Image (cartoon, rainbow, N blue to C red):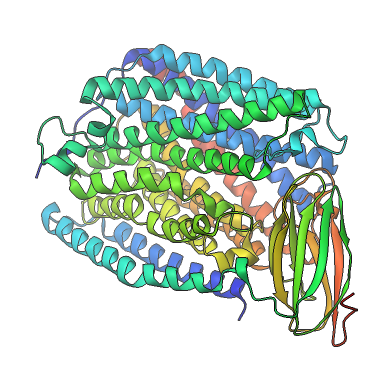
C-alpha cells in the first residue's frame, strides 16, 4: 500500500517569510485568548451572584467572548497548520499578513460596536435580532459588528484560497490533496502526508463555510439598511449554523496537524497516510458539511429528513477522524519509551479532550435528548470540552514547541499541563452539571438553585486562566528569539 | 430516571473509560516495545470499534428516532397558542388538564425565542423554537399536576433571562374553549 509518512526525526522548517506572521498570529491568539477567558470568568462570576453586572454589559461581553474565541481558535489554528504545511507546499507568507491586518481591523470594529455601541447580538447574530434589538443598541452598532465579522471572514477566505492554490500546484488538485488517487486508484505517486490531507479538508470546508457566513452577513446588513427587505428566518438560521458549525470544527482540524507532526518526532515512530486514514478524512469532509442540522433540532419547521441526518450522521461522524486520529496518537505513544514533558502531555491531553468532548455532543445530537438539553448549559459544556481541552492544548503545544526552538527533547513541565487538565475538567464539568440541572445557557442572571454550578465553575476558571497565562507567557517571553532565529 | 440523568451517566461512563485508556497509555509510555506489534493491536482495536459502532451504535441511533417530537400524537388535544415577543410570553390559556395532550402553537412576533417548559422541580420537560413567520407545534402530555414555568431558551436580547410565564396543570384544567 502506498504510504506517506510524517517522518520520525525530520525537522520541518517553516518558510522564513511565513515565520514572522505565524509568530504574530500566535502572539495575538495568546493575548486575545487570555482577555476572552477573563471575560468568561466575569460572566461566570455574574451568574454566580458574586459580581454585579448590568445585563446589557453581560450580553455585550458574551458577544465579544463568543466571537473572539471563535476568531482566535481560527487564528491560532491557521498558524499551526500554515507552519507545518509550508514544509510540504510553497505558500506566500504575505497572505498571512493581509489576513492579520483584516483580522485586527475587524476586531477593532467589533469592540467598538459592542462596547461603545452596545451591540449584544451574540456570536450567532441570529436574524433578525441585529436589526431588532428592542431599542437596546443603535443600528450603526449592529452594522459595524456585522461588517467587522465580514472583514475577518474575507481575510480567512483569502488564506484558504492561497492554501488551496498551493495544494493544487503541489499535488495536482484538491482531490489529490485528499489522497483520492491513492484511495481509489492505488497510485503510489505523490502521496500526501497527514498534514496535507488535513489542510485540504480544511480549505474545502472552510471556504464553503465562510462563503455561507459572508452571504448571511451581507443579507443581514442589507436588512439593517433596508428593513423592508426581509430574509426567511429559517434560511438565515440554517446559513448561520452551517457557517458556525463548519468553521469551529475546521479550527480543530487545522490545529490537529501539530499532533500529526510532533508525535512522530517525539516518539521516533512515523504517522502513516494509509487508505483508512484517507477514507476517514474524505468521509469527514463530507459529513462535517451535512450534520449541521443538529443545531436546529428544535426548529420543528425544518424538514424531518434533515433532522434525521442531523442525528444519525452526527453519530457516524464521530468515528472517522476522531477514532482514526485518536487511536493513531495512542498507538504512537504506547510503549514508545518517551519521557513525558510539557509538549507531549499537552498533545496527549488534546487528544483526550477532543475525543471526550465529542461524547456529550453526540448524545445531545439525539433528538429525544435535545428536546430537554438544547440551549441548556449542556451545550457550552461539550463545546468548551473539546475547545478548552482539545483545541487549546494543541495550540499551547505549538507555542511551547516554537518557544523551545522547535526542540522536542523532553524538558519537563508536564505538571502544569496536568493541572490545566484538572481545572479544565472541573470547569467544563460544571457546565455539564448545569445542563443536567436544566440551567438555560446565555442567561445574564441565574436562579438561586443554579448558583452552585456557577460558583464552582468560577473557581475552576481562575485555575484555567492562571495556567493558560503560564503557557502563553512561555511563548511571549521567547518571541524576540523566535523572530531573531527566523 | 430522567433523560438528563441518563445522558449525564452515559457521558460520565464513556469519558471515564476513555480517561482510563489514556491514563494507561501515559503510565506505560516509558516502556519500550517495537512499533509494529503495537500498531497491529491498535489497528485491530480500531476495526473492533468500527464494527461495534456500525453494528450496534448505528442501529441504536436509528432506533432512537422513533420518539421524534415533530409528529407527536395530539388526539383530543388541548390547544394553547403561545406567542413570544421581546421580552414576554402571551399564552391564550394557562390552565390545562393532566394526562391529556396539550398542543402548543408556538410563534414569535419579533426575533427568535425558545419555548422551554419546566416542571415544578425545575426540570426542562419539552421545548421548541419560537420563530417569526413560523408556527411550531409542540405536543406534550403533563403527567403530574403543578405549576410549570415557561422560560426562554433562545437568546433574544436584553431581557432574555426575564421571559417567564406559567402553565397550571390540574385534574380539571381549564376550558377547551
Residue B60 in view, yes or no: yes
- Among the 4 quarters of the image, the one containing residue A152: top right
Where residue A339 sits: x, y (%)? 28, 48
Kindly identify the residue that appears in the image at 82 percent across and 54 percent down: B84
Question: Looking at this view, is B129 or A343 the one in front?
Answer: B129
- The quadrant in which the N terminus of chain A is found is top left
**Is the residue B59 above or below the residue A462 in the image?**
below
Q: Is residue A68 left or right of residue B32?
A: right
Which residue does the image show at 54% across and 61% down from the upper left? A364
Specify the farthest residue to the bottom. B171
**Against A322, is A254 above or below?**
above
Judge whether A420 appears above or below A27 on screen: below
Whole-percent x, y for residue B177 in the image: 90, 74
Residue A13 at least partly seen? no
Image quadrant assignment for residue B5: bottom right
Q: Quadrant of residue B63?
A: bottom left
**Left or right of B171 in this view: A389:** left
Q: Which residue is pictured at 56% across the width and 69% down the height?
A: B8
For the C terminus of chain A, which image quadrant? Answer: top left
| Residue A351 x %, y % | 38, 50
Amino acid at each position: 500500500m502506498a504510504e506517506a509518512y510524517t517522518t520520525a526525526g525530520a525537522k520541518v522548517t517553516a518558510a522564513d517569510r511565513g515565520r514572522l506572521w505565524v509568530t504574530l498570529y500566535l502572539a495575538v491568539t495568546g493575548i486575545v485568548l487570555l482577555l476572552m477567558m477573563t471575560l468568561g470568568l466575569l460572566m461566570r462570576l455574574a451568574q454566580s451572584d458574586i459580581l454585579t453586572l448590568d445585563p446589557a454589559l453581560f450580553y455585550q461581553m458574551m458577544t465579544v467572548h463568543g466571537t473572539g474565541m471563535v476568531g482566535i481558535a481560527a487564528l491560532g489554528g491557521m498558524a499551526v497548520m500554515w507552519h507545518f504545511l509550508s514544509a510540504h507546499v510553497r505558500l506566500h507568507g504575505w497572505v498571512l499578513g493581509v489576513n492579520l491586518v483584516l483580522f485586527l481591523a475587524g476586531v477593532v470594529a467589533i469592540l467598538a460596536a459592542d462596547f461603545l455601541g452596545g451591540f449584544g447580538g451574540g456570536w450567532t447574530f441570529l436574524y433578525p435580532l441585529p436589526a431588532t434589538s428592542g431599542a437596546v443598541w443603535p443600528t450603526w452598532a449592529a452594522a459595524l459588528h456585522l461588517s467587522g465579522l465580514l472583514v475577518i471572514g474575507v481575510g480567512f477566505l483569502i488564506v484558504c484560497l492561497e492554501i488551496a492554490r498551493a495544494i493544487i500546484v503541489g499535488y495536482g488538485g484538491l482531490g489529490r490533496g485528499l489522497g483520492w488517487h491513492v484511495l481509489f486508484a492505488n497510485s503510489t505517486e505523490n502521496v500526501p502526508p497527514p498534514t496535507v490531507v488535513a489542510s485540504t479538508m480544511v480549505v474545502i470546508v472552510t471556504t464553503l463555510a465562510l462563503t455561507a457566513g459572508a452571504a448571511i452577513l451581507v443579507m443581514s446588513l442589507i436588512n439593517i439598511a433596508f428593513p423592508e427587505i426581509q430574509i426567511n428566518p429559517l434560511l438565515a438560521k440554517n446559513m448561520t449554523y452551517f457557517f458556525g458549525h463548519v468553521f469551529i470544527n475546521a479550527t480543530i482540524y487545522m490545529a490537529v496537524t501539530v499532533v500529526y507532526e510532533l508525535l512522530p518526532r517525539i516518539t521516533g515512530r512515523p504517522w502513516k497516510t494509509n487508505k483508512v486514514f484517507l477514507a476517514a478524512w474524505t468521509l469527514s469532509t463530507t459529513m462535517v458539511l451535512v450534520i449541521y442540522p443538529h443545531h436546529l433540532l428544535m426548529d420543528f419547521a425544518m424538514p424531518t429528513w434533515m433532522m434525521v441526518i442531523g442525528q444519525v450522521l452526527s453519530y457516524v461522524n464521530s468515528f472517522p477522524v476522531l477514532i482514526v486520529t485518536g487511536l493513531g496518537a495512542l498507538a504512537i505513544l504506547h510503549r514508545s519509551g518517551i519521557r513525558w514533558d510539557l509538549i507531549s502531555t499537552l498533545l496527549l491531553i488534546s487528544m483526550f479532550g477532543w475525543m471526550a468532548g465529542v461524547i456529550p455532543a453526540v448524545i445531545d445530537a439525539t433528538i429525544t435528548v435535545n428536546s430537554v438539553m438544547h440551549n441548556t448549559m449542556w451545550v457550552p459544556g461539550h463545546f468548551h470540552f473539546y475547545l478548552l481541552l482539545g483545541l487549546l492544548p494543541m495550540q499551547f503545544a505549538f507555542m511551547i514547541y516554537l518557544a523551545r526552538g522547535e526542540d522536542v527533547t523532553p524538558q519537563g513541565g508536564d505538571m502544569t499541563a496536568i493541572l490545566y487538565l484538572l481545572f479544565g475538567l472541573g470547569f467544563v464539568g460544571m457546565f455539564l452539571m448545569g445542563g443536567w440541572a436544566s440551567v438555560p445557557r446565555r442567561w445574564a442572571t441565574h436562579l438561586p438553585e443554579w448558583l452552585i454550578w456557577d460558583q464552582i465553575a468560577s473557581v475552576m476558571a481562575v485555575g484555567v486562566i492562571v495556567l493558560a497565562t503560564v503557557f502563553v507567557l512561555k511563548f511571549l517571553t521567547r518571541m524576540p528569539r523566535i523572530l531573531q532565529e527566523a | 430516571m430522567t433523560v438528563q440523568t441518563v445522558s449525564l451517566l452515559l457521558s460520565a461512563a464513556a469519558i471515564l473509560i476513555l480517561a482510563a485508556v489514556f491514563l494507561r497509555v501515559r503510565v506505560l509510555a516509558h516502556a519500550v516495545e517495537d512499533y509494529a506489534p503495537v500498531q497491529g493491536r491498535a489497528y485491530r482495536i480500531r476495526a473492533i470499534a468500527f464494527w461495534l459502532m456500525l453494528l450496534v451504535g448505528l442501529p441504536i441511533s436509528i432506533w432512537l428516532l422513533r420518539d421524534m417530537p415533530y409528529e407527536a400524537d395530539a388526539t383530543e388535544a388541548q390547544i394553547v397558542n403561545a406567542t413570544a415577543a421581546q421580552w414576554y410570553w402571551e399564552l391564550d390559556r394557562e390552565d390545562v388538564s393532566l394526562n391529556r395532550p396539550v398542543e402548543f402553537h408556538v410563534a414569535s412576533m419579533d426575533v427568535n425565542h425558545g419555548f422551554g417548559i419546566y416542571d415544578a422541580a425545575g426540570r426542562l420537560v419539552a421545548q421548541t423554537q419560537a420563530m417569526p413567520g413560523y408556527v411550531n407545534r409542540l405536543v406534550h402530555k403533563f403527567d403530574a399536576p403543578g405549576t410549570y414555568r415557561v422560560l426562554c431558551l433562545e437568546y433574544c436580547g436584553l431581557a432574555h433571562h426575564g421571559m417567564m410565564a406559567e402553565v397550571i396543570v390540574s385534574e380539571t384544567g381549564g376550558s377547551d374553549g
